[in-house]
Amino acid sequence: MSDSPDPERLKELEARIKAAKGEEDEAKTGDEAYNQASFAWQMVIELTVGLVIGFGIGFGLDSLFGTKPIFMVLFILLGFAAGMKVMLGTAAQMQKKAEDASDTQVSDKKEG
């Protein structure tokens, strides 16, 4: 018999202790909250970038043609629409990822 403990058995024991205490679920909840905040910021940035690009294009065209507010307003609206479209696509992607994760958890519970 050796004096050094088996690292794999120690990791397995640690995982069982955490599962018994319920610490594993808390770690997943923190990661989930981080992912939701990350997606929220991503959607805000997508909408803002659409507006800024629309403003830039509209302002540039207005300066070029000498028609101050017309193209700027038009392209800000188009930028808003494009930003919303991308933002809704991100929301759909997030919802699909959440559904896939819940399906995986349900199938894991049924097996266990």
Image: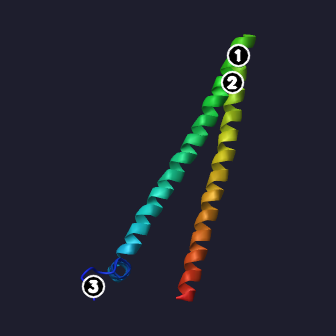
Estimate how packed mark 1 is, as few (under 14), some (14 to 19) or many (20 or more) residues with alpha carbons within 10 Å.
some
Residue 61, image x, y percentages: 72, 18
> Tag on residue 57?
2
Which residue, as the protein is rendered here, is positioned at the far front? 1
| Residue for badge 1 | 62
Q: Is residue 109 above or below residue 79?
A: below
- Tell me the amino acid under the disc marked 3: Ser
Which one is closest to the eye, mark 2 or mark 3? Answer: 3
* Sequence-first tag of 3 and 1: 3
- Tell me the amino acid under the disc marked 1: Asp
Q: Secondary structure at mark 3?
A: loop
Residue 45, image x, y percentages: 55, 41
> Tag on residue 11?
none
Q: Secondary structure at mark 1?
A: helix
Determine the CA span between mark 2 and mark 3.
73 Å
For the residue pair 86 and 108, the one nearer the viewer reads as 108
- Tell me the amino acid under the disc marked 2: Ile
Q: Is residue 54 above or below residue 20?
A: above
For the point 24% across and 82% down, the residue is 3
Determine the CA span between mark 3 and mark 1.
81 Å
Identify the image quadrant of residue 48.
top right
Q: Secondary structure at mark 2?
A: helix
Estimate how packed mark 2 is, as few (under 14), some (14 to 19) or many (20 or more) residues with alpha carbons within 10 Å.
some
| Residue for badge 3 | 2
For the point 72% across and 22% down, the residue is 71
For the point 60% across and 59% down, the residue is 94
* Sequence-first tag of 2 and 3: 3
Which one is closest to the eye, mark 2 or mark 1? Answer: 2
Counting labels gives: 3
Which residue, as the protein is rendered here, is positioned at the far top? 66
Residue 100, image x, y percentages: 62, 70
Determine the CA span between mark 2 and mark 1.
9 Å
